[in-house]
Amino acid sequence: MTHRLSSRIAAVLDLQPAAPAIEFEECWVHWGELCEYARAVRDLLGDERPQVGVLLRNRPQHIATVLGILMAGATLVVVNPARGDDRIKSDLADLALPVIVGDADDIATYATYVTPAPGNSVITIGDITESPVCEAASEPGEIATRAGVAVRMLTSGTTGTPKRIDLTYDMLAHSVLGPEPTEVRRGVAIVNAPLVHIGGIYRVLQNICEARSFVLLPKFELQRWATAVRTHRPKAVSLVPAALRTVLHSELTAADLDGVRVVTSGTAPLSAEDAEAFTDKFGIPVLTSYAATEFGGGVAGWSYADHQKYWATKRGSVGRASLGAQLRVVGADGSVLEADQPGLLEVKPGQLGPDTEWLRTTDLARIDADGFLWILGRADQAIVRGGFKVMPDDVRTALESHPDVQGAAVVGRPDARLGETPVAMVELRSTVSTEDLSGYLRNRLAPYEIPTTIAIVDAIPRTPSGKADLTAVRAHFDAGGAP
């Protein structure tokens, strides 16, 4: 039986074939072109519903490939082509998938690891106006399937080795399916999130299922993003915190963002100060949210109405439960805590259905009497310096409040005397010395919270979601990294 998400995708692609669907590098791809390519992928996969590994990039033909996989009821296994050759080769070898899909260059690079075994196939993605090419072995083989799973998505790997999470067709349908459209909607959205992250997949599927055209950016780049905003005047845009701070401290004015009514921001912590500074500069409220790949998307966020009514008294919160989620905070013994008591956050995501067990996170949080959620930091990232607990997010927020700091990342470094001490990696928007930064922090943090080392770098290593890659940051300091 065809899942309702697969049916919705097929129906939308058939609505208005001649209408523009995706603008990419100043050229439009039409709905009919998306439909033809997606159907070709669906037909190549057949009825077996295999797991399909895709070296996924932000390109229209890759989106069409994803749509074809979902129309076939198969499972998309996301492979990030930017993770580095060794990790990608290891990933492909370990997965041993029956079907691998990628650009010709990617397929050639990893040929040893994607050569068809008996019953296995390699599909090369061409231009959106061409049909994908399938190379398959003639001998039959066992087809690896994962019934009911739409996407196997890597978590960000912010604090350790990434792991794959199963996102079912039901989970995605719960998040992206609204009323069925009867025509292509007016207005053009902007997608600048990477498809290898849940945010990119979610936003693309949301636009497709709503029959909304959108601009697809290969990645967030200030001038390209600003041009798209000025040209299409979307009512809502999404910016991860690092991108939001780039816009905030750019030369863009309120006139450049004319027409934008709200900015949504998630995937990483955003300080209340940055959110308010953005609103002061552009006159646009910032609606933060809380989500995780494990949840299949968002579980809390600000609505526009809540922001208008509550921001002054609830600033810094990530909003209230959304999409049918339930939230609670528990103590170390698992007992449910009263309002405003800090503890570990537990979640029942609405996407997982009513019979879901409580999922315990590693996030320290509190929930007030009105249901607003504050994320206080990661319990597994706390740095204990000589008996004093240091929360990295507190130090990061203080550093990022400096007018010359573009972004910061803070981790613990082993210390023979104190156990561990905080160290920070900082990228700047204008020149400032590490001594000046340390002096700035003395008025904002306790002495034990001030980093023992501040390394200034050209760019902080980041995951596809825009979070600082703390594994890479730790490796920098483990290797003797210095300013």
Image (cartoon, helix red, strand yellow):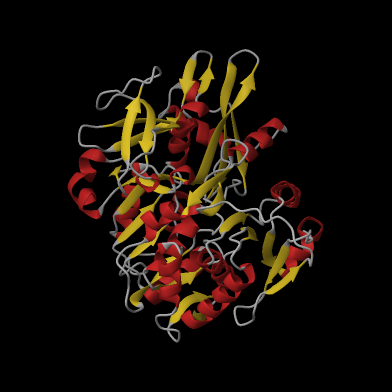
Q: Is residue 121 visible?
A: yes
Most extreme residue toward the right is 112
**For residue 72, which quarter of the picture?**
bottom right
Residue located at (45% from left, 73% from top): 10
Q: Position of residue 39 (x, y in %)?
A: 55, 75
Tell me the quarter of the picture where residue 181 sits.
bottom left
Number of marks drawn:
0
Above or below residue 168? Residue 421 is: above
Residue lying at 65% horizontally and 53% vertically, measured from the top left:
144
Residue occupying the point 57% across, 70% down: 42
Q: In the rendering, at what x and y percent does residue 28 appear?
A: 50, 81
Compared across the picture, whether 345 is left or right of 98 comes to: left
Q: Quadrant of the C terminus?
A: top right
As displayed, is residue 198 above or below residue 182? Answer: above
- Seen at 53% across and 18% down, the residue is 385
Residue 38 versus residue 260: which sits nearer the camera? Answer: 38
Residue 60: image location, x then y, percent: 55, 72
- Note whether residue 450 is visible: no
The residue nearer to you, when weighing 465 against 33, is 33
Q: Nearer the viewer, residue 423 or 67?
A: 67
Taking the view exactly as shown, the residue that stands out farthest to the bottom is 18
In the image, taking residue 422 as reference, residue 339 lies left or right, namely left
The image position of residue 248, as x and y in percent, is: 41, 55
